[in-house]
Every structure is written in structure tokens, then in C-alpha cells.
């Protein structure tokens, strides 16, 4: 009887130890993910500050330093007050960076990537940028907070830095959508809009974005103004999407 009591006590100690280890591992993963999500990748780039000029402010010099790690990096995107602070990459397909980070290393988190069809030589009308809605909070997960108007009011701008400029974009619309079947007619396929061939096409995109918006931002855009659209998965429906549309501040 005494032996059975000791065995039972031993098993309880082992079980409790396993549970405590699991809890500690989960907490460790959370802290690790949080620290990596909050990391300002661009701000970590060391530069010669004597090289800062009006034409090349600090953020552009930091971007140039970051690009030495990967020539696919074409910009840096940040929304202040959120974990969204990442390099933006572009290549000749929209698949590679869904499962690779900005260093080209495999990562299920993926990267923020610009649609392959965006043409920098024009430039195109709309910077269509994709990112995963990761459960660990990385990439575009925090875009889901824009479903609430209060969050938009507290975070109304996107900072987008390229080799030629460091600019802010003001958000004009936030809407829920989905990937539509080819057979569906008269639907707003926002994910096809990159370069407006006509003024009408541009205005249709703005009108449809404003019409679908979850709330009225009081902002709009006129033909010729540079747009940026952030797109991520949403689970409100099958193949759901959430999009945030903004325009460059002059």
C-alpha cells in the first residue's frame, strides 16, 4: 500500500512538472514572438549620419543599408503604434515570399510583398501589398484592428519609404471582401487594380472602396494621386480578405 502511494505521488509530481514546462515553453514563445514583432528592423540599420541630407533622410539611408541583405527589398512599410514595421519585397512572382522572410530564409510567417505587376518605371497607380494575417501577431495581423473606427482614428497614416522618398499615406477606406469566383459578375475585385488605364478606372476603384468601407473616413483621392492598398486574409467568410486603402499625402 505504501509503495502504491509513493508511485502515485511520484506520478503526480511528474505530471505537474510536465504541465509547468509546457506553460513555460508557451510563455517563452509568446515573449519571443512579441519581441520579434516589436523589432524595428529599419531602425537597427547603422548608417553614417553625416551622409543625411534633405534628399536622403535617415530612413532612406537605412533602407539602402538594409537592401544590401537582399536586392528584392524595394521599400519599408510602417504604421506607428503597431507591430507593422517591415521591409517590403518584390520579385517576378507572388508565391516565393508567402513562405520566406526578407532575408530569403524559409518562414511560415512570410513577408510583406508588393504585387509582381507593379511597374516602377511608370509608376503604377496602386501599390498593392500583401501580408499574412498570422496568429502570432506578425506581418499584417494587426490590420484586423482597422475594423474598428477608433483604431483607424488612432492610426490614420502609413509610412512608406523607398529609395527616392520617405512619405506618409492617409487611409481613405477599410473594407472586408473575398476572392471572387470567375463566374461572379459585377463584383469589386480590388486585388486586380494596380495601374489605372483611364481616369474612369481610377475613380471606380476609389468609389467602390469608399462604398465598401466599414466607416466613413472623410477622406478620398483624385485621379493621379498615388495609392497604396494593404491586403490580408480575413476569416469572416471563405477566402475572406481585409483591405486598407490609402493615398500619398502631398
Image: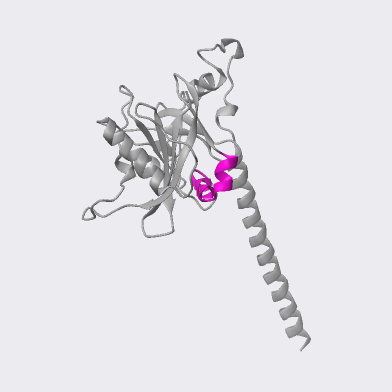
Residue 250 or 161: which is nearer the viewer? 250
Relative placement, left or right, of 58 versus 173 is: right
Prevailing secondary structure class for the magenta stretch in the rendered image:
helix
Q: Is residue 141 magenta?
A: yes
Instruction: Please state the horizontal and vertical placement of residue 214, each as a whole percent of the image.
Output: 46, 50
Instruction: Say if 23 sits above or below 162 in the image.
Output: below
Relative placement, left or right, of 31 versus 123 is: right
Residue 58, by quadrant, is: top right
Residue farthest bottom in this picture = 1
Residue drawn at x 65%, y 55% is 27
Residue drawn at x 51%, y 15% is 56
- Magenta segment: 138-155
Residue 203, by quadrant, is: top left
Q: Is residue 99 magenta?
A: no
Q: Quadrant of the N terminus?
A: bottom right
Residue 82 visible here:
no
Instruction: Say if 138 sits above or below 58 in the image.
Output: below
Residue 153 visible here:
yes
Q: How many marks?
A: 0
Instruction: Please state the horizontal and vertical placement of residue 115, each as a whole percent of the image.
Output: 34, 36
Instruction: Please state the horizontal and vertical placement of residue 234, each as a whole percent of the image.
Output: 43, 54
Residue 117, by quadrant, is: top left
Amino acid at each position: 500500500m505504501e509503495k502504491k502511494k509513493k508511485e502515485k505521488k511520484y506520478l503526480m509530481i511528474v505530471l505537474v512538472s510536465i504541465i509547468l514546462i509546457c506553460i513555460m515553453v508557451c510563455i517563452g514563445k509568446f515573449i519571443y514572438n512579441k519581441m520579434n514583432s516589436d523589432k524595428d528592423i529599419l531602425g537597427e540599420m547603422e548608417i553614417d549620419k553625416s551622409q543625411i541630407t534633405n534628399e536622403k533622410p535617415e530612413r532612406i539611408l537605412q533602407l539602402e543599408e538594409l537592401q544590401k541583405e537582399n536586392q528584392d527589398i524595394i521599400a519599408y512599410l510602417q504604421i506607428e503604434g503597431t507591430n507593422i514595421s517591415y521591409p517590403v519585397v518584390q520579385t517576378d512572382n507572388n508565391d516565393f515570399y508567402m513562405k520566406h522572410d526578407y532575408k530569403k530564409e524559409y518562414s511560415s510567417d512570410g513577408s510583406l510583398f508588393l504585387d509582381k505587376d507593379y511597374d516602377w518605371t511608370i509608376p503604377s497607380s496602386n501599390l498593392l501589398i500583401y501580408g499574412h494575417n498570422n496568429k502570432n501577431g506578425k506581418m499584417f495581423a494587426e490590420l484586423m484592428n482597422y475594423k474598428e473606427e477608433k483604431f483607424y482614428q488612432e492610426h490614420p497614416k502609413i509610412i512608406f519609404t523607398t529609395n527616392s522618398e520617405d512619405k506618409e499615406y492617409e487611409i481613405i477606406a477599410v473594407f472586408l471582401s473575398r476572392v471572387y469566383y470567375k463566374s461572379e459578375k459585377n463584383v469589386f475585385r480590388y486585388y486586380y487594380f494596380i495601374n489605372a488605364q483611364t481616369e474612369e478606372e481610377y475613380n471606380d476603384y476609389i468609389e467602390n472602396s469608399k462604398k465598401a468601407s466599414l466607416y466613413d473616413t472623410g477622406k478620398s483621392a483624385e485621379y493621379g494621386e498615388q495609392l497604396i492598398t494593404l491586403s490580408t486574409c480575413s476569416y469572416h467568410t471563405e477566402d475572406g480578405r481585409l483591405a486598407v486603402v490609402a493615398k500619398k499625402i502631398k
